[in-house]
Amino acid sequence: MNDKPSVPEVVLKIWVHPGRTQEDVRWDVWRKAWVIAVRDPAISGRANRAVERLLSVRLGVAPSAVSIVTGSQSPLKSVRILGIDPSEAELRLRRRPGT
């Protein structure tokens, strides 16, 4: 029997737009995925690290809680976030920064 409490987590399907002038997170109904724009280019993992940082800030979790699990060299990725359940993650991502 496992007595450890389970840590909430969510895996998000995201589509990344690297090299943009502004960072943004929005839901794309057509893709059925979160679209994330980051300033960093898709060179040497810089855009991936920027995505992890941006999601950590927007979701209010530690940077170490965010990791890309599939698609490290593709615009379509799956990202695992520990410490937050799916409904709370969606609520926080839909909220505009500063509101």
Image (cartoon, rainbow, N blue to C red):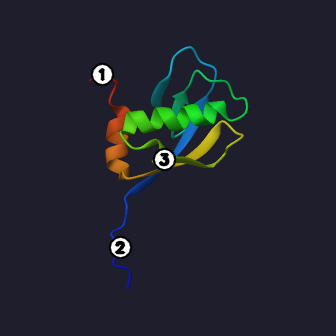
The amino acid marked with disc number 1 is Gly
User: On the image, which quarter does residue 18 sit in?
Assistant: top right
Q: Which quadrant is home to the N terminus?
A: bottom left
The amino acid marked with disc number 2 is Lys
Q: Secondary structure at mark 2?
A: loop
The answer to whether residue 35 shows anywhere in this view is yes
Disc 2 to disc 3, C-alpha distance: 20 Å
Residue occupied by mark 2: 4
Horizontal and vertical percent position of residue 55: 46, 37
Residue occupied by mark 1: 98
Please report the residue visible at 63 percent of the width from the left and 40 percent of the height from the top.
76
Please report the residue visible at 59 percent of the width from the left and 35 percent of the height from the top.
49
In the displayed structure, 83 sits above or below 43; it is: below
- Category of crowding for the residue at label 1, using alpha-carbon neighbours closer than 10 angstroms: few (below 14), some (14–19), many (at least 20): few
Q: Which quadrant is home to the C terminus?
A: top left
Q: Secondary structure at mark 1?
A: loop
- Category of crowding for the residue at label 2, using alpha-carbon neighbours closer than 10 angstroms: few (below 14), some (14–19), many (at least 20): few
Q: Secondary structure at mark 3?
A: helix
Q: What mark, if any, has residue 75 been given in the picture?
A: none
For the residues bearing labels 2 and 1, Cβ distance under 8 angstroms:
no
Please report the residue visible at 37 percent of the width from the left and 61 percent of the height from the top.
7
Judging depth in this view, the residue of 27 and 59 nearest the camera is: 59
Residue occupied by mark 3: 64
Residue lying farthest to the top in this orientation: 21
- Depth-wise, is mark 2 or mark 1 nearer the camera? 2
In the displayed structure, 4 sits above or below 23; it is: below
Disc 1 to disc 3, C-alpha distance: 23 Å
